[in-house]
């Protein structure tokens, strides 16, 4: 059991229409702590019927919620934000227990999650329309923005809280209602957010959390025409599937999918800063973020020096249970994740790569994995083609700016990119040529609530956070007034 100041934050029921519910079948799904293998609790194993009930509840709540002033909705959301921060210790403990990330990282994610609620509560007061000069006498043209309606969110396990608030905050702030289906590996963080939303005064049906099997819930959310919009964060394969399913009801979509981020170190880079950035980008959350550096390209002139410094820094990473003081890398989420890291390393080594440090399962067992660096990696290896989603840094040598850009763009993904260098001309050239939605220049961390997060190519559609994030939940309406 998790040691919580407020044990009522660990909810083992789903939250539909303002009430805590079990599955119609009475079935449950077990949730396991990946660091210990110990059962944390269970959540209802719901399906299509309960999903329909959630959609009806969200639809029933929509009219009254959208009729409120933006300021009134903002006041409730502000309370939700404050309650989340008041309960940061418990929320972080729930997250570390079910997801594995170190407690300090979990606390950071809770603050990040809350920041979206504060930002969008304010931003919704500024969803301005427009007047347009008419091309015809006696007419006036006005453009308004309206909430799109009932929204669905399907969220992943790597950021169990912030991927929910990044979607729910703009939806709710703009007057939409929402059904969230969290990852079945990390439902307790979602349910704790629902409990705090309830305490903050979110009206019945405005925010619902349904737990259960992904496929039947996803099928209903995508095929039900009452749901006007789906926002998904997860793998490209599942995103593609949901996009195809949503075609039947022409849903508006936001998709935040896989990445394969290049991290380029030019010859004039500050190598210590580049190593610090690479550690932050590559090893955060055990390498399980969609913006993790997946391919580290280093200029020939600094290849050895950078590799040595990176290895030294990686050897300081403390692997262990996220609740243990001083631990900086928790377990991977499950065995499948460990097998993927192993397969990528094995493929690279078979094709000529060298393991500089790590390279195998950690002696702690379970899904713990050694922080790894491999050198002499080339473009034809699996590790440069696919997202590893583990603590493995492959280093690839390059000789010219053109070559680095060509290799960086040689992927169907386009989420994040990073590079380190001091030449201002090169910084502009490279930033403009990288095919991606976000570029970290001399930094390994860039996510926040005020900037637009999202990808190009097969990394997704739409933007989250920032002033752009609220547009995803609004529709433009054109009023043409004649007879004047
Ligand atoms: P990962 O491989 O990182 O777990 P997924 O894309 O599989 O990422 O999962 C992200 C979210 O998508 C989770 O909430 C998961 O339950 C959900 N999901 C997976 N498959 C489906 C599906 N067929 N329909 C709807 N949701 C799905």
Image (cartoon, helix red, strand yellow):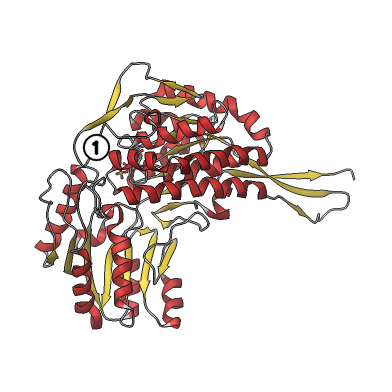
Q: Is residue 326 left or right of residue 49?
A: left
Evaluate whether residue 451 shows in this view.
Answer: yes
**Residue furthest to the front:** 5
How many numbered badges does the structure rendering display?
A: 1
Residue 331 percent location from the top left of the image: 22, 47
The answer to which image quadrant residue 96 occupies is top left
- Beta carbon at label 1 within 8 Å of ligand 1: no
Up-down: is 11 above or below 359? above
Q: Which residue lies at the image location 14% right of the left edge and 64% below the top edge?
A: 357
> Which quadrant would the C terminus be assigned to in this image?
top right
* SS label for mark 1: loop
Task: Decide: few, some or many residues near mark 1? Use Cα within 10 Å; few <14, some 14-19, many ≥20.
Answer: many
Q: Which residue lies at the image location 27% right of the left edge and 65% below the top edge?
A: 295
Residue position marked by numbered label 1 in the rendering: 33
Residue 401 percent location from the top left of the image: 34, 79
> Which quadrant would the N terminus be assigned to in this image?
top left
Q: Which residue lies at the image location 45% right of the left edge and 26% below the top edge?
A: 15
Q: Is residue 369 left or right of residue 253?
A: left
Up-down: is 409 above or below 469? below
Depth check, front residue: 369 or 66: 369
Quadrant location of ligand 1?
Answer: top left
Residue 438 percent location from the top left of the image: 44, 62
Residue 482 percent location from the top left of the image: 85, 44
Q: Which residue lies at the image location 51% right of the left edge and 52% below the top edge?
A: 465
The answer to which image quadrant residue 95 occupies is top left
Q: Is residue 144 left or right of residue 101?
A: right
Evaluate whether residue 378 shows in this view.
Answer: no
Depth check, front residue: 404 or 321: 321
**Residue furthest to the top:** 25
């Amino acid at each position: 059991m998790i040691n919580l100041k407020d044990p009522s934050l660990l909810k083992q029921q789903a939250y539909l229409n303002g009430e805590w519910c079990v599955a119609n079948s009475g079935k449950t799904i077990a949730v396991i702590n990946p660091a210990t293998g110990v059962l944390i609790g269970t959540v209802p194993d719901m399906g299509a019927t309960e999903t329909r009930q959630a959609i009806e509840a969200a639809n029933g709540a929509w009219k009254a919620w959208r009729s409120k002033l933006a300021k009134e909705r903002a006041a409730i959301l502000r309370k939700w934000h404050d309650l989340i921060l008041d309960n940061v210790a418990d929320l972080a403990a729930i997250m570390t227990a079910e997801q594995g990330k170190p407690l300090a990282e979990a606390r950071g994610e809770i603050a990040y999650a809350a920041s979206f609620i504060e930002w969008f509560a304010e931003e919704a007061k500024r969803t301005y329309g427009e007047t347009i000069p008419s091309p015809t006498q006696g007419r006036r043209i006005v453009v308004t923005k309206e909430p799109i309606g009932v929204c669905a969110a399907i969220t992943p396990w790597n950021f169990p809280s912030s991927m929910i608030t990044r979607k729910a905050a703009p939806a709710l702030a703009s007057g939409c209602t929402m059904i969230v289906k969290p990852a079945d590996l990390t439902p307790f963080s979602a349910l704790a957010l629902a409990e705090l939303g309830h305490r903050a005064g979110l009206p019945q049906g405005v925010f619902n959390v349904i737990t259960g099997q992904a496929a039947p819930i996803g099928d209903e959310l995508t095929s039900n025409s009452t749901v006007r919009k789906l926002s998904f964060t997860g793998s490209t394969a599942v995103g593609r599937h949901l996009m195809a399913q949503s075609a039947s009801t022409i849903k508006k979509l936001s998709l935040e999918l896989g990445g394969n981020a290049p991290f380029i170190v030019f010859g004039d880079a500050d190598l210590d800063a580049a190593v610090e950035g690479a550690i932050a980008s590559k090893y955060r959350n055990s390498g399980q973020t969609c913006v993790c550096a997946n391919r580290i390209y280093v200029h020939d002139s600094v290849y050895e020096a950078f590799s040595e410094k990176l290895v030294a820094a990686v050897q300081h990473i403390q692997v262990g249970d996220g609740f243990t003081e001083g631990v900086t890398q928790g377990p991977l989420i499950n065995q499948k994740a460990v097998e993927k890291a192993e397969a990528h390393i094995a493929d690279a080594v078979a094709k000529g790569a060298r393991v500089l440090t790590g390279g195998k399962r950690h002696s702690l067992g379970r899904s713990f994995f050694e922080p790894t660096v491999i050198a002499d990696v080339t473009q034809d290896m699996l590790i440069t083609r696919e997202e590893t989603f583990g603590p493995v840094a492959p280093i690839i040598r390059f000789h010219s700016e053109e070559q680095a850009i060509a290799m960086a763009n040689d992927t169907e993904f386009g989420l994040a990119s990073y590079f380190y260098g001091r030449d201002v001309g090169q910084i502009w050239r490279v930033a403009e040529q990288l095919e991606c939605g976000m570029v970290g220049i001399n930094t390994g961390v860039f996510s926040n609530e005020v900037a637009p997060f999202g990808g190009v190519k097969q990394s997704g559609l739409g933007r989250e956070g920032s002033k752009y994030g609220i547009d995803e939940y609004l529709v433009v309406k054109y009023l043409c007034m004649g007879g004047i």
